[in-house]
Image (spheres, helix red, strand yellow):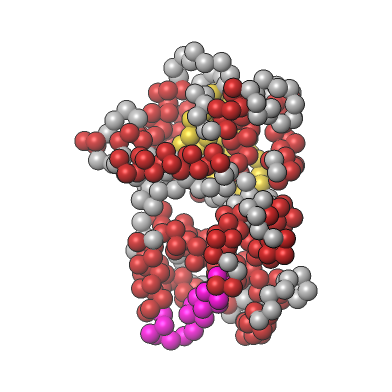
Amino acid sequence: MNISEAQPFVWQRLSKIKSNDKIGTSYLFSGSVGSGKEWCAIEFSKLINCKSDGPLSCRLCSSCLKFSSLQHENLNLVFPLPSISKSKTEDDPIKSISKEDYELILKMIDLKSKDPFYKISLSNARRITINSIRFLRKNLYLKSQNSGRKIVVIFDAHLLSEGAGESANALLKILEEPPNNTSLILVTDKKFKLPLTIISRCQQIDFSSLPLDRVRELIESDEVNNDRATQLAMLSNGNMHLANELVSKGIDQPLKEAHSIIESLTLLDQNTWRDSINNFSMLAFRKPEEFVFKISLVQLWMNLALRYKFDKKESGSLGEYFDSFEKFNDKYPDANFFEINNLLEDAMMALNRNLYMPLFILNMMISIQTLLKGKKPKIII
């Protein structure tokens, strides 16, 4: 499958930009998690530098081959990096991190070139550092000997705003005086976390969740049979990151785990709450990726319960879980699913905000209890 099939409306707009020779200096790709924004950013970068005049890159020229491996001299990838002490700072921020992290990043970039939905993410990287933007600025304004257009792709762009926001301010200066023959593409699931001054200087490209048929086809390309791929596509709700996790872990165990987490979050029992707070806090500190996955499971279960509430047939063949969904909806007829989902999104973002997680999780659990009753929580997380 190519990007024009996965996100046809977005790609039609982007290919028209190339064919009309109206390539801008800055773009903001935002929308649902796992909707192919990073994939689209890379493919658009490839198309811009491709010698072909078609709506898709040729994939055969030297430029396309280099972009496909994420090794093109015109491509600058920016993503969160671990903080480093000033005494270790080198010109290139990637060379300033530990040898282990450096080798891991090289491996991740290689994996990303083979799987567009692979996420470049170091567990100890909480923000896009000011050093990354300074190094970028230094390189972009140098006169290039290479043909084609320089492209900057910033993954998890909302993390520019973490800390004191100095990285966002540094990038804003580049956007205000963009270098010649250069395009910047900011990619984020959290557009609202970016300053309005940055948003207003970018052409905004909004992504919807991937259609379930497309998710199914992508899962099937990983040698998963049609029936199982259909179930996984429905469970993922258009999120290929979650779909890939479910492919590796199966269906039954994640749903059982999600149900168990829901019970611990909704059961008004002091010992259960204490255990939940301790377990989530330890995961957030030691295994942040597992913490995010568990929160995603809660989102998944809530989405399925909401879907079952309005259309039992549309919920798919989830067998034994129908009874759980029905009991949940009967118990919480006024549940505010939308705000609960936002709360869970905030929980995943909390890892990047260096919050005191036990207190945060306690507040989250109290807020979920209130939202399940259809009331507005007094505690602001």
264 inside magenta stretch: yes
In the picture shown, does residue 307 fall above or below 204?
below
In the picture shown, does residue 110 fall above or below 135?
below
Q: Residue at x 41, y 76 (%)?
A: 276
Residue 225 position within the rendered picture, expressed as x and y whole percent measured from the top left: 69, 60
Residue 121 position within the rendered picture, expressed as x and y whole percent measured from the top left: 44, 48
Residue segment shown in magenta: 254-273
Residue 346 position within the rendered picture, expressed as x and y whole percent measured from the top left: 49, 60
Closest to the observer, 354 or 196: 354
Closest to the observer, 328 or 198: 328
Closest to the observer, 301 or 179: 301
Q: Residue at x 65, y 29 (%)?
A: 59
Q: Residue at x 48, y 61 (%)?
A: 292
Using residue 58 as the reference point, say whether residue 273 is left or right of it: left
169 inside magenta stretch: no
Report the residue that reaches farthest toward the left.
87
Q: Residue at x 51, y 21 (%)?
A: 179
In the picture shown, does residue 218 fall above or below 297?
above
Residue 356 position within the rendered picture, expressed as x and y whole percent measured from the top left: 34, 63
Closest to the observer, 27 or 247: 247
Using residue 69 as the reference point, say whether residue 230 is left or right of it: right
Q: Where is residue 39, by image quadrant? A: top right
Q: Is residue 234 visible?
A: no
Report the predominant secondary structure element of the magenta stretch.
helix
Q: Where is residue 131, by image quadrant? A: top left
